Amino acid sequence: MNNNSVKLLKYIGCLIFILWSGKVFASDRFEDSHEIWQELNIYHKISTKFTANLLYNNMYNSSSGNGDWFLQPGLKYNVSQKITLEAIFRKEFFKEGDKWTYENRSMLRVGGSTKIGQWSFRNRHRIEFRYFENFPMKSRYRTDLKIKPEWSLSTMQLTPYFLEEIFVSGNQISRIRSYFGIQGEKGRWEPAWYLMIQSNRDKNSFTHMFVFGISLGYRL
């Protein structure tokens, strides 16, 4: 890592801290609860253009003691070296009171990536159509920006990253997620750990919650 990369890392770190601090202190409060997320993502490159994957996610809330979980198969098409198109389906189970219910979610996502020096940038846009067992259908738009350096910290190729995701529902921002994580790669395995701050809209302000996540990817 050269001096320019160090300077850029410090600059981006300061910018992230300023933006995040402004978001937190301009709003109401942090929630008393937190969540723990566990993810397993198995994927297989079918051809030079297509990749299939299956994501399992388990979410535990410290306040309620309940956890949501979902299975999410998807198919990604490489339009070019920098542009991807994905078709995704999710079957999610969650508790409403004492009863389990579910959501069927169909999604389309387009993404683009580029590199500037020793840094990579990825931006994705997703449209969701959410069908619930006991609620009317809802739609939602999401976009995220991921920034990470093109260098590693160890033989496991551990690399820090920052990701900001914005949710839009009903013509307004309904949720913001800020991820600070480390991802790696060892053979077919791709472990990652992250701290995420989830900000949910509460009328005219936001409430915040910490999410601790661990993710494991495996290439077939």
Image (tube, rainbow, N blue to C red):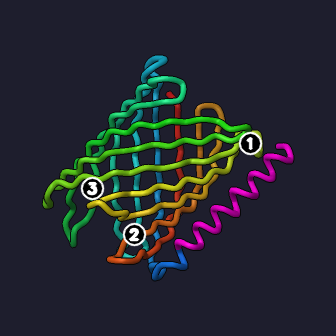
Disc 1: which residue? 152
Of tags 1 and 3, the one toward the viewer is 1
Magenta-span inclusion, residue 100: no
Disc 3: which residue? 93
Q: Which mark is residue 200?
A: 2
Q: Position of residue 218 (x, y in %)?
A: 52, 36
Q: Position of residue 172 (x, y in %)?
A: 33, 63
The residue segment tinted magenta is 1-23
Up/down of 30 relative to 44, above or below: below
Q: Earlier in the sequence, mark 2 or mark 1?
A: 1
Residue type of the residue flagged with mark 3: Phe
Q: Earlier in the sequence, mark 2 or mark 3?
A: 3
Residue depicted at 26% across the width and 61% down the height: 170
Which type of secondary structure does the marked residue at label 3 adopt? strand
Mark 3 neighbour density, 10 Å: few (under 14) some (14–19) many (20 or more): some
Q: Foreground: 7 or 67?
A: 7
- Estimate the spatial distance between the alpha carbons at disc 2 and disc 3, rounded to whole Å: 20 Å
- Estimate the spatial distance between the alpha carbons at disc 2 and disc 1, rounded to whole Å: 33 Å
